[in-house]
Image (cartoon, rainbow, N blue to C red):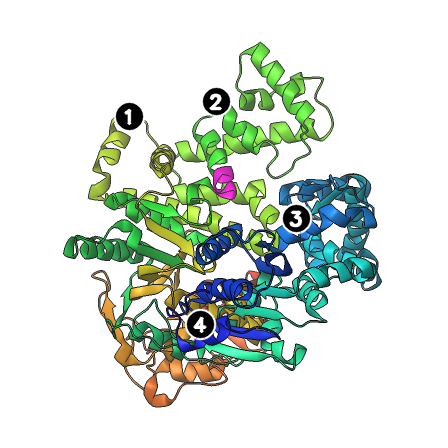
Amino acid sequence: MPNLSHLNPEQREAAEHFEGPLLVLAGAGSGKTRVLTTRIAQLIEEFGVAPERILALTFTNKAAGEMRERVRTLLERDPAGMWIGTFHAIGARMLRRDAARLGWTPSFLIYDSDDSERLIRRIVKDELQLDPKRWSPKAFRATISSAKNELVTPQQYAESALDPFSRYVATAFERYQRALRDANAFDFDDLLVTPVELLRTHPDVLRRYRERFQFVLVDEYQDTNRAQYVFLKLLAAEHANLFVVGDDDQSIYGWRGADIRNILDFEKDFPDARVVRLEENYRSTQTILDAANRVISQNVMRKGKTLRTANPTGERLVLVETADEADEAEWIVAEIRARMQDDAELSPRDFVVLYRTNAQSRAMEEALLREGLPYRVVGGIRFYERREVKDVLAYLRLVANPADDEGFLRVVNVPRRGIGDASVARLAEWASREGLSLLAAAARTAEIPEIRGPAARALPELAELIQKHAALADRGVALDEILRTLVEEVGLIEMLQEEGPEGADRIANVEELIAGAADLQARLDEGDPDLLPELEEMQAVPVRAVDLFLTHVALIADIDQHDANADAVSLMTLHNAKGLEFPFVFVAGMEEGLFPLSRAYDEPAQLEEERRLFYVGITRAERKLYITLARRRRRGAEWLDSMPSSFLEAIPPDLLDIRKSPQVRGRSFGIFRGAGSALSSRSERLGLRAARPAPADSRYTVDYSDSQETPRLVKGTRVRHPQFGAGTVAELSGRGADVRASIDFDSVGRKTVVLRYANLQPEG
């Protein structure tokens, strides 16, 4: 019999549960994996359930492996016959056995996302004869994937397709599924969807699996989508022995199909269900938990629980106001270094920096490199290795060095210009024969009769574009200006805009690269002492800013290559932090429009998911939590003023140690000056206040006394802009800190401005 003495009363109640549906609401750090694995061991040892009667489902291979290993340790033997795996792995296992029922053979292939996108691209371009630059295959794939996970068939999708894009998707969807079948292949979505179809259409198969899996256990239930929900309902409909563990307060994947209603409505789906709340946290200090509890209590869509711990009260949270993203990064790195100097037992692996968007990693990476601290970017690609960043850098390399054939080959068809592989091969052959670089050969495409059609026009246009920007660099035009015009003229932004939400992240990375270039240009212009060798080099030899920037990037990229398992500071998005824990946690960029993202104000449910994401970040911390914000951030080469995140309002002031970085001088946000501040009134006016606010005496407010109040505008209002002059408001859009106005200016025509930055004055 498994030893249950290590469990607290609530954990034990869940682990000893035998039959019937049970929802374990497992708060962050409450030992849910221990409960799951002990319950499996209990079923086998105490209740005599054969291992093959148990199905345990997870979301990652790592979690599945850990679960099996823990069960093996508890039983002191392997649970032979038990199925433990991810939803995708279990679905594939079912299909191997019964795919023939649906027209596939057991030797089917599984297409990954790249395989799927290539297939859809071929359908869009060759069969639908659409321009992939206008009709993005990535957008087609995302739409088809979303439909599949909602269990929508191609026929059903076609019936509701009203606009041109949807009608094209409907046709592509049907042809895509046909092509998969012809190839005897499934994509990853099919591994969830097709088992549901199999169970629904073949009663004998459903009966077989229901009889086999008498006990079904699910980890991270809050992350299930529609297909997974139906799959579980089908398997557990008769015996109802469904044991699910999850935390509605950590449901942060709605953007990829997870439906929080699955966990919120569990008791409606299974009226006889029991609910056990695991509220004792074994990870964090009580101070950290108090902050987390106050933040998440602002949400309405939750079942409700309050985390507690037997751990010490701990230190207050540190809230730091910094000047900009570079100052923020430098402050964080200095604090990490100071902590390690004060405590010899600490090492870089004890620290993590969490941020909302990938683009925020650039400043952190550069600050860590300057300080000589090892780091790793977890769950993502390092900034200078990201596809879109490498594309821009390849263009810039060509500007700096027209003989860079590798750079040419990378960007010759990015964005797509109608230059096929055959044309590139002919160009390379001619260039080799003439002893020219590929770019030089492209400028003389007219001399290559074998190259015809779109390629004959596109190649010399590309060469002309590069030559134009090389001339700008030679004339000493600002580095960030060169980069921005280069990106705009080659059409990279338009290409990325077609990729949906992922494209927005990539655009942010391009903007961040331009910001890095602007930073270096400013330091060169100001004669930064740290760049003295570079400045002397520029005077001694004809070295341009573009050359220095590329050298800077190349050295960083070279240093970047290190063992991911080495002792290093971790950098990651908040989404990638779920399930992890660190002694010291920094949550960076707590500003309106960045966290929460501006678009979250479009829907209350999105804003609540953003708040859950903040809750996840807070509860990663074991000993100490830092929250940082910047007075301003760069967007490309432009500085934009920032405001503290409205999420900070929920944290009581007695939990906070409020600091300012050395660079912050004079009046700033005036953080936390008590009730009646500008943020309080502004929050109410903009509808930012949560539906269930904390009591007034338990929260701080933020004073924006230095910020410009935006005028109240309506359509038709006459205003004056400091640059564009007088005009009439034509349209208003956006919410919160991202309200925009389209204004018909008397002298320059229509322009769209962000109100909080426009400094508009009413006329008349």
| Residue under the image location 35 percent in, 51 percent down | 570
Identify the amino acid type marked 1.
Val
Query: Sequence order check: which comes first, mark 1 or mark 3?
Result: 3
Q: CA distance from mark 1 to mark 4?
A: 62 Å
Residue 622 position, x and y percent, is 31, 64
Q: CA distance from mark 3 to mark 4?
A: 36 Å
Query: Sequence order check: which comes first, mark 3 or mark 2?
Result: 3
User: In the shown orientation, is residue 549 left or right of residue 120?
Assistant: left
Magenta region, residue range? 386-392
Front label number (3 vs 2): 3
Residue carrying label 3: 138
| Residue under the image location 70 percent in, 65 percent down | 235
SS assignment at label 2: loop
Of 753 and 257, the residue lying toward us:
257
Residue carrying label 1: 541
SS assignment at label 3: helix
| Circle 2 crowding by C-alpha within 10 Å: few under 14, some 14–19, many from 20 | some
User: In the shown orientation, is residue 463 left or right of residue 484?
Assistant: right
Identify the amino acid type marked 2.
Ala
Identify the amino acid type marked 4.
Gly
| Residue under the image location 25 percent in, 57 percent down | 331
Front label number (1 vs 3): 3
Residue 528, located in which quarter of the rendered image?
top left
SS assignment at label 1: loop
| Circle 3 crowding by C-alpha within 10 Å: few under 14, some 14–19, many from 20 | many
Tell me if residue 111 is in the magenta stretch: no
Q: Which mark is residue 27?
A: 4
Q: Which mark is residue 403?
A: 2
Query: Sequence order check: which comes first, mark 3 or mark 4?
Result: 4
Q: CA distance from mark 2 to mark 4?
A: 58 Å
Identify the amino acid type marked 3.
Lys
